[in-house]
Image: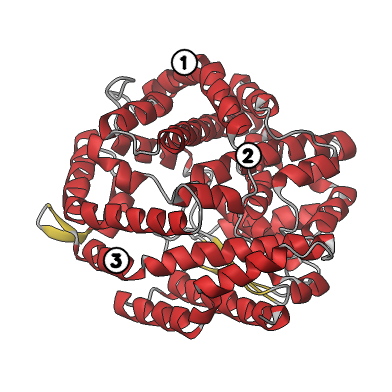
Amino acid sequence: MNISDYRGEFTLFHSALQEEQYRQHGHHPTSNDTRANLRHIFERYADLHTLAHVRDLVEKLKDASAFEIEREGLQKLCADARIHYAKREAHDTESELTRCLEAARIEWKGASIPASGVRARIVLETDAADRRELAARLFDSLRPCDDLKLACNEILNETARRLDFASYLALRRDAENLKPESLVAASQELLEQTASVYYRELARALAEYLPGVVIGEATYADALYFRRSAQFDDYFRANRAAPLYQRAMSNLGINPAGQRNNIKLEEQTTELPDAPSAAFAVNVPDDIRLIISRAAGVNHFAEAISEGARAQYFGWTSSDLSARHPEFIYAPDRATSEGHAALFRYFFLDAIWLAEHLGNLHPSQASEVARFFALVELHDLRSCAAQLQIEWTEMQNGSATEADERSQIMSEASGFHIPRGAYLWIDEEPHTGTVRLRARLFAAQMREHLRTRHGSRWWASSSARDELIDIWNTASRYSVEELAQLTGAGELTNFDPLIELITKTLSEE
């Protein structure tokens, strides 16, 4: 194997994937067109992800004379090859699953609705009975696809075992170079330490914003509507997320319209809530594409800011690093890019930032928004912690958790009842919860670090901007755990700073 040639093909593969994902996200091609384009990309670069190349990369890792940066790069290349090899093995079943999901529909008030569009309706449905019925019909429509979903998971697990990992989840953990024991223990403490304040604030918020919905009866459908935060739409109106992103960056000292790196900004073509913001690293650092949602709502605005930060993170990457080590750009561990996105997402926990950047918010209104946003964030953190607990138990036992037990664990963590048969379609890819937990831990500790060094209004500090650009320059060479150590932010196994940030915001009037 010529490693330089391999890196060249690796770059072309991931660049093509990012460009296709950008095209799908912004221009909504037909499903047949999407499948054909993705199949063409994977077929064109099939040689990247063969078992032979996985073994070649493992052998190269044994070279004791390799420089540290080369060994770090080889580890990421090897992890990426293993992941895509496993996914390639599951490709045919995954294609069947995709066709099954595309065929799933529900009948609703005289209309036939694709299953893929039901969640967007639930999010907007003000009537509790209707949104719960929509959710029930959604999961009923997906039930014929259950076996295919389980089959995909089993193929991934079987392939991981052939690669000497206990499961696909264990393979992903290795890609993150993560020893999960301490994070599992800390996540259990998170659940225990926040239970009282979470249930108290959730009961208060349900009574205020969702009359008639109470703890013990609230469902997954109610959670979707609740997180939507519709009560604040007058403050976060449609078509205003892009200007907010531009103001936020300008205040930090970055001119989105005139910066040296090429970040192409465009707005979504629809105001629907299922058209989120997203950043795409097509050719780092010269071709970064940022699509910002036009939908109303605080969550859409927060997502626009966080995806804008992700675009900046890619845009300030060293061109030399990108050319020599593209594996640091398209790293299999997404926690580093996610951590920087979450850092900017946490602006919405800061009432002062909200009041300054949204001219239609009084300080008391900004505090109300920040407090509710903190509650939604705690909901998500507790759900991720519960997911990690389930995954850890499965890794220890070597078997899947029973559906009833999984439902109970997730329901107790979130305060919203999760249907027994829904876990296949609510949980995302295994390990996603861990990525988000690590990213949020990093964001909270990095936020405190920046506040200590540059003041409470660090988001208007040129020195804070310069420090962030220095970090962004390294892309994902360093994990969030390593970055926390390098910046002096501390160990990322202690949830106390994050819990303190959330609970302090919840207590502010």
Residue in the foreground of this view, choosing between 33 and 172:
172
Residue 61 x %, y %: 71, 63
Specify whether 33 is left or right of 307: left
> Colour scheme in the image?
secondary structure
Res 109 seen here: yes
How packed is label 1: few (under 14 Cα within 10 Å), some, or many (20 or more)? Answer: few
- Separation of residues labelled 3 and 1 (CA atoms): 44 Å
Mark in the foreground, 2 or 1: 2
| Kind of residue indicated by mark 2 | Lys
Specify whether 158 is left or right of 298: left
Mark in the foreground, 3 or 1: 3
Res 330 seen here: no
How packed is label 3: few (under 14 Cα within 10 Å), some, or many (20 or more)? Answer: some
* Quarter in which the N terminus is drawn: bottom right
- Separation of residues labelled 2 and 3 (CA atoms): 31 Å
| Kind of residue indicated by mark 3 | Thr
Contact between marks 2 and 3 (CB within 8 A): the answer is no
Reading the image, the residue beneath label 1 is 200
Residue at disc 1, secondary structure: helix
Total tally of numbered discs in the picture: 3
Q: Could you tell me which residue is drawn at 37 percent across and 77 percent down?
A: 34
Residue 430 x %, y %: 45, 48
Q: Could you tell me which residue is drawn at 74 percent across and 70 percent down?
A: 325
Above or below, 81 against 10 in this view is above
Among the two numbered marks 2 and 1 on one chain, the one whose residue lies closer to the N terminus? 2
Residue in the foreground of this view, choosing between 137 and 202:
137
For residue 93, the mark is 3
